[in-house]
């Protein structure tokens, strides 16, 4: 595991006049935010969730303790929300938290180093690993069993099968 805090959402806008906020969730089950405990910001501010309701597929309406006005909610616009990595459940086999993949060494199936996983992207058709090579160039690899047959956290690496078309 590569990070102690995991980004789980971002405040996108105030909602109404009594301090509620719209939050875009980055979790598989957006409503699960309630079960992770207080959320925190990049500056370390803690936000206890008083109420939460599902708005759309990945959007929630939240009320945080101590945020009681629209102005207070407006000040949170753009606030990135984190939870401790330990608060999240262990992923199922062959499921991974993006943050756990970032920083792993990328090796070819022949054993040569390609670079490091610098990001996990998804534009709607599935996850893609962004690999940054030693020269700073990047390469995008579909994150599928065929293209990435091995994810080995103990060795700090992923294996990329370059022979797959």
Image: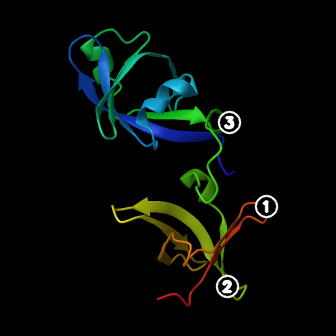
Residue 8's label in the rendered image is none
**Residue 11 % position (x, y):** 35, 32
The residue at the far left in this view is 16
Vertical comparison of 98 with 129: above or below: above
Q: Residue at x 35, y 35 (%)?
A: 78
Can the viewer see residue 18 in this picture? yes
**Residue 146 % position (x, y):** 55, 78
Can the viewer see residue 44 in this picture? no
**Disc 2 + disc 3, Cβ < 8 Å:** no
Left or right of 30? Residue 133 is right
Callout 1: SS: loop
Query: Spatial distance from mark 1 to mark 3, Cα to Cα?
Result: 18 Å
Callout 2: SS: loop
**Residue 111 % position (x, y):** 73, 85
Query: Spatial distance from mark 2 to mark 3, Cα to Cα?
Result: 32 Å
Give the residue at mark 2: 109
Give the residue at mark 1: 154
Query: Spatial distance from mark 2 to mark 1, Cα to Cα?
Result: 17 Å
Vertical comparison of 41 with 103: above or below: above
How crowded pointer 3 is (Cα within 10 Å; few <14, some 14-19, many 20+) is rated as few
- Which quadrant of the figure has residue 65? top left
**Residue 73 % position (x, y):** 31, 19
Q: Which of these two is toward me, 109 or 106?
A: 109
Reading the chain from its start, which is encountered first: label 2 or label 3?
3
Give the residue at mark 3: 86
Left or right of 142? Residue 12 is left
- Which quadrant of the figure has residue 157? bottom right
């Amino acid at each position: 595991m590569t990070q102690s805090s995991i980004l789980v959402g971002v405040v996108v806008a105030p909602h109404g006049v009594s301090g509620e906020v719209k939050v875009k969730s980055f979790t598989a089950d957006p409503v699960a935010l309630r079960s992770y405990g207080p959320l925190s910001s990049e500056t370390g501010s803690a936000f206890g969730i008083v109420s939460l309701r599902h708005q759309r597929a990945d959007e929630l309406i939240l009320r945080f303790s101590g945020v009681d006005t629209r102005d207070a909610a407006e000040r949170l616009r753009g606030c990135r929300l984190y939870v401790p990595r330990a608060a999240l459940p262990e992923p199922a086999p062959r499921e991974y938290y993006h943050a756990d993949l970032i920083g792993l060494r990328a090796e070819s199936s022949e054993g040569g180093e390609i670079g490091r996983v610098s990001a996990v992207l998804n534009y709607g058709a599935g996850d893609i690993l962004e690999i940054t090579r030693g020269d700073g160039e990047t390469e995008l690899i579909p994150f599928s069993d065929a293209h990435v047959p091995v994810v080995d956290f103990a060795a700090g690496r992923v294996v990329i099968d370059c022979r797959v078309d």
